[in-house]
Amino acid sequence: MQESSLKDQVMHCIDKIGSNSTMSTIMLDAWLSLEGFLVQCDKLPSRLEDIDAATLSGFVERQSLQCIDVELFLMMLAGIRMILLESGCAIEQLAPLSVHVKRQRLANDKNGNYRFVKVLAAAVR
């Protein structure tokens, strides 16, 4: 029951935000990842606004280690942040939903244009 209630709350927030279908899908996928983490940690609250900052920090840390696509990861974090803000979470509570990103230089393309890729700062050596 609790999971259904949270998913209903998430869907209500996504509807109120009014994003396009692509971002709505990203937000829902992001939520499902977070919800899975909450279930694993046995910290699934009855209300979205009851998710604590320490739990969000643990989620971001775990996801950072598994991150393959930095751009998608950043959109997922933004989606979770929008959902939780819409639900009434305090901005201070959401501080852990951020990561440090650096641009890493790649070799020039065949036309000599500069190229960069975003990487998580912790992954840069």
Image (spheres, rainbow, N blue to C red):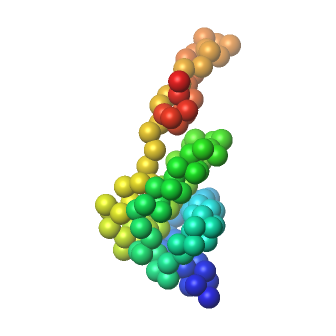
Residue depicted at 52% across the width and 49% down the height: 61
- Relative to 59, is 1 above or below? below
Residue depicted at 59% across the width and 61% down the height: 30
Q: Give percent across and percent down for residue 24.
A: 58, 64
Q: Residue 28 lies in what quarter of the image?
A: bottom right
Residue furthest to the bottom in view is 1
Residue depicted at 41% across the width and 54% down the height: 96
How many marks do you count on the picture? 0
Residue furthest to the front in view is 42
Left or right? Give the position of 49 relative to 115. Answer: left
Location of the N terminus (image quadrant): bottom right
Residue depicted at 46% across the width and 75% down the height: 48
Left or right? Give the position of 47 relative to 62. Answer: left
Q: Give percent across and percent down for residue 18.
A: 49, 69
Left or right? Give the position of 110 relative to 120. Answer: right
Q: Give percent across and percent down for residue 125.
A: 53, 24
Foreground pick, 3 / 41: 41
Foreground pick, 109 / 48: 48
Q: Is residue 116 visible?
A: yes
Q: Is residue 11 visible?
A: no
Q: Residue 41 lies in what quarter of the image?
A: bottom right
- Relative to 53, is 86 above or below? below
Q: Give percent across and percent down for residue 20.
A: 56, 62
